[in-house]
Image: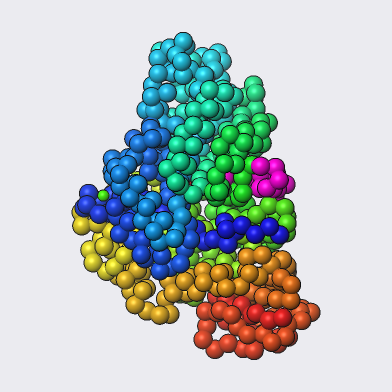
Amino acid sequence: MEHNWWKESVVYQIYPRSFNDSNGDGIGDIPGIIQKLDYLNYLGVDVIWLSPVYQSPNDDNGYDISHYDQIMEDFGTMEDWQNLLEEVHKRDMKLIMDLVVNHTSDEHEWFQDAKKSKDSKYREYYIWRSGKNGKEPNNWGATFGGSAWKYNEETDDYYLHLFSPKQPDLNWENEELREDIYAMMRKWLDRGIDGFRMDVINFISKTPGLPDAPKKENEVYGSGGQFFMNGPRIHEFLQEMNQKVLKDYDVMTVGEMPGVGVEEAKKYTDLSRNELQMVFQFEHMDLDSGSGGKWDLKTLDLKDLKESISRWQTGLHEIGWNSLYLNNHDQPRVVSRFGDHDNYHDKSAKMLGTFLHMLQGTPFIYQGEELGMTNIEFDSIEDYRDIETINFYNEQVHEKGRDKNEVMKSIYTKGRDNARTPVQWDDSPNAGFTTGEPWIKVNENYKKINAEKALREDQSIFHYYRQLIRLRKEHSVIVYGDYELILPEHEKVFAYTRSLNDEMLLVLTNFSDDTVKINVPDIKMTNSEVLIGNYEDQEDFQSQLTIQPYEARVYKGK
Ligand code: TEU
Ligand code: CA
């Protein structure tokens, strides 16, 4: 298999608003990030992915960009950003930027001009349609609620917005738009960045005609996914982007792709096709949702996780490359989601880290994950900040009259603000995140869970993550080894092997609070030792093993 630096790297995602505030205005910022680079360097990560820091009215916290070439005032200046890049590089780390080009903000000058008149130079940069019998052009619903269309008085027609009305979709059919995007990308790459994470990049090609979508009986809007996810020209657009921009730079690329399956992902990530290197897929993030979507709560069945992860591991093997993640700024905290933050906080956080970091692919750590930060439960909807959460609440409680507590339960479990409370740096007021009033409340458990304490205690989740990251540098079997699932029917233990030449890893992770005995199937391992584990007493490798609650144990042998 071809060796590449981005296959051997560990990425750390920063959501700048919630990371570290340097000037007491309650909002994380770029100078605040610079103050923590030594911390990240000590953790051992190679690459930092920065969620958007561009100018934005913050309807969706920066995922609504009003100027691609300016830094959001809340976060600092272009000079601060240059400084950040320099400081990152000084420490031999890399910086990748978020690229949000499925849509802009409605306050972007392109859209401001486009909405004024049908003759605007930028008119075709967006997707306009006339109404149908005085109604929206089609029945698609938007991700953040309501119709995916908004009426524009000046031109008496509608524009498409797959997310909020303040995030109009760009029209990738238009060549000038594409050229402008490529020029913008080159500008950032020429500043010396090391790659892009591309926001919903598989949404940029829409099926011509924008047909109505299938609709459930009790719903107002249809879900148009099949007409904009992995659309007809998507591979062509990505190949063009590669040809016109990416191929000239040695950078990391990862495309965020809701609704992508393994077969499609092979195409996106097969290097010989010149598209991207990795995708963020969502299958494993959807396993604890019912048919009603993300808010429809369901308990994870471990066998589903095994089936899905294994299909991706073997599917992309030798063809493309996997990204590995268990949470990000849109998802609940993993220790609360798949672990047990009340009874086995440290154990389950370490187990989940082990599970992920021993897979084949490039691991992504989300800020605070290395501390075992947990979900949040605010009493009042007033304390929530996320547009998706607030819209969902209003729709369910005020429009549909659903029980408030039921709705809050979904928000507690799945809301995006779970991931967006400030990073807990120490046990001083507001967890050391800010000296002012934080833009979103700090999780009250910061006295127990914080970085200062984690650095001090050598058994902490933080130090365990350091070890996981270091092991990846020391053992190429972790990066390049073949994956094989064992004990596929076991309901509590996720077990797999990795093998490369004569090296072999056996990874055992208990997703339950039971002590279980397993019979190891026919695996030949000699000279085995425990490479890493989250319990102190460790059995020698043998055909029957006892796995403690939320235990993770990795044997290495030949
Ligand atoms: O997310 C795209 C996406 O489809 C989901 O992750 C979605 O936002 C969420 O799960 C809703 O349930 C990307 C960004 O990561 C997200 O923060 C933005 O809000 C969204 O695109 C629009 O730019
Ligand atoms: Ca600030």
Q: Residue furthest top?
A: 119
Q: Is residue 279 visible?
A: yes
Residue 350 placed where, x, y %?
50, 72
Residue 475 placed where, x, y %?
61, 73
Residue 557, by quadrant, is: bottom right
The residue drawn where x is 39% and y is 28% is 108
The number of numbered discs placed on residues in the rendered structure image is 0
Residue 115, by quadrant, is: top left
Indicate yes or no whether the magenta region holds residue 319: no
The residue drawn where x is 37% and y is 73% is 454
Residue 431 placed where, x, y %?
28, 63
Task: Looking at the picture, tell me which residue is in the foreground, 378 or 248.
Answer: 248
Indicate yes or no whether the magenta region holds residue 269: yes
Residue 366 placed where, x, y %?
46, 58
Magenta part of the chain: 255-274
Quarter of the image where the N terminus is located: bottom right
